[in-house]
Amino acid sequence: QVQLVESGGGSVQAGGSLRLSCAASGYPYSRYYMGWFRQAPGKEREGVASITGSGETTYYADSVKGRFTISRDNAKNTLYLQMNSLKPEDTGLYYCATSSRVGTRPNSVVLWEGMVFGYWGQGTQVTVSS
C-alpha cells in the first residue's frame, strides 16, 4: 500500500524558514520522481517543486525559485522541502506526491513539468504571517 506522510508544517513570520518532510512507503521509492504541491484557500492546487528518482534533476515553480530547495534521501525513503525567505503568499496546505505508476489505483492525477502524479499525502499546513 502506497503511503506518503508529510510533517514539518507550522506557523512562521515572513522571512522565516521551515523544512517539510515526507516519509514514503509501500513502493520502490528511489525509482520514482517525487513532488511538492500546495493549495491555498479558494485556489487550485499548484506545483511547487519536483525531483527525479536519482535526485539529480529538480524543477521549481517560478514563484519559489531561489527560496525553496527540494531534496531526497533514498536510504531513508524521505523527501524534503527546505523553505527559506517565506512570504505570506506561500501560505497553504502542502502535499507531497509521487508518480501515478507506483501503484494500481492512482487518484487526482496531475501533470506537472512533464511528470504525472497520482499518489498524495494528507498534507501539512504552512501559515506565513506578515
Image: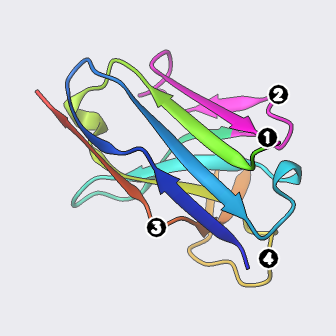
Which mark is first along the chain, 4 or 1?
Answer: 1
**Residue on which disc 4 sits:** 103
The reply to whether callout 1 and callout 4 are in contact (CB within 8 Å) is no
Q: Nearer the viewer, mark 4 or mark 3?
A: 3
The residue that label 2 is drawn on is 56
Of the numbered discs 1 and 3, the one sitting upstream in the chain is 1
Q: Which residues are magenta?
A: 51-75
Q: What separation in Å lies between label 1 and label 2 (alpha carbons)?
A: 6 Å
Classify 10 Å Cα crowding around label 3: few (below 14), some (14-19), many (20 and above): some
Q: Which residue is mark 3?
A: 122
**Residue in view at x 68 percent, y 59 percent:** 24
Q: Are marks 1 and 3 in contact (CB under 8 Å)?
A: no
**Does residue 107 show up?**
yes
Q: Which quadrant: the C terminus?
A: top left
Q: What mark, if any, has residue 52 been given in the picture?
A: 1
- Farthest bottom residue? 105
Labels 1 & 2 near each other (Cβ < 8 A): yes
* Element type where label 2 sits in the image: loop
| Secondary structure character of the magenta stretch overall | loop
Q: Quadrant of residue 127?
A: top left
* Residue under the point 31% across and 25% down: 86
* Left or right of 40 in this view: 34: right
